């Protein structure tokens, strides 16, 4: 059931993309950290844990890309916007898109994106052996270039498939 919050009397307002994704992440025990700059907003996921990622550690960033306005957002509802979820991974100073969501209803699109992120994080964690640091905490062993799972977006979800002529 979609999340709504009341605004002015009984008229419901759709939940923000951030709230939808945060709720979807609870199923996978994933914590995301919100950030924003210059009118854009996004969520960051520490691939190796729940805190903020260490400098240089791989990080996933997810957001809704609105191709019409050329903006990213998570702090607004997805309804009435031509946006789709995207996920980027940043490793070793390089960032690339690893997931292009498909246009569908907001709940389905969010659920699909959260499932992709959970699988992606699991694959990367499995590929990186853990070591204990001086305090006895277990951490993933740093690797210069972690092997990342490959992902090929469906043919109908390329960055250009959203563009339609007006």
Image (spheres, rainbow, N blue to C red):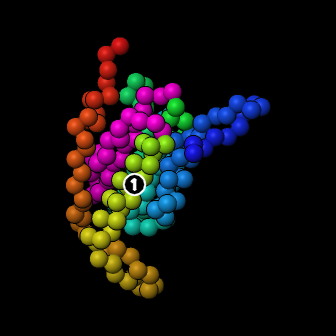
Can residue 142 be seen at all in this image of the molecule?
Answer: no
Q: Is residue 151 above or below residue 124?
A: above
Relative to 165, 13 lies left or right: right
Residue with the mark numbered 1: 115
Nearer to the camera, 35 or 147 = 147
Judge from the rendering whether residue 38 lies leftward or rightward of residue 133; answer left or right: right
Compared with residue 97, is residue 68 higher up or lower down, i.e. above or below?
Answer: above
Q: Is residue 103 magenta?
A: yes
Q: Is residue 39 above or below residue 92?
A: above
Quadrant in the picture for the C terminus: top left
**Observer-nearest of 94 and 2:** 2
Name the image quarter holding the N terminus. Answer: top right
Extreme right residue here? 9
Q: Position of residue 83 (x, y in %)?
A: 42, 32
Q: Position of residue 76 (x, y in %)?
A: 55, 36
Q: Is residue 77 above or below residue 58?
A: above
> Where is residue 4 shown, x and y percent of the image?
63, 40
- Residue at (48%, 28%) from the top-left corner? 81
Relative horizontal placement of residue 156, taking residue 75 as reference (left or right): left
Residue shown at 67%/40% (left/top)? 5
Q: Which residues are magenta?
A: 80-106
């Amino acid at each position: 059931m979609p999340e709504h919050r009341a605004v002015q009397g009984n008229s419901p307002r759709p939940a923000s993309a951030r709230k939808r994704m945060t709720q979807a992440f609870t199923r996978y025990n994933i914590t995301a950290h919100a950030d924003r700059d210059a009118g854009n907003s996004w969520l960051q996921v520490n691939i190796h844990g729940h805190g903020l990622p260490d400098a240089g550690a791989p990080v996933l960033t997810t957001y809704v890309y609105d191709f019409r306005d050329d903006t990213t957002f998570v702090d607004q509802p997805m309804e009435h916007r031509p946006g789709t979820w995207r996920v980027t991974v940043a490793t070793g100073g390089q960032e690339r898109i690893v997931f292009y969501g498909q246009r569908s209803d907001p709940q389905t699109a969010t659920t699909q994106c959260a499932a992709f992120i959970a699988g992606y994080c699991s694959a990367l964690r499995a590929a990186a052996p853990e070591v204990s640091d001086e305090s006895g905490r277990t951490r993933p062993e740093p690797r210069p270039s972690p092997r990342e799972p490959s992902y090929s977006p469906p043919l109908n979800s390329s960055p250009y498939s959203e563009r339609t002529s007006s």
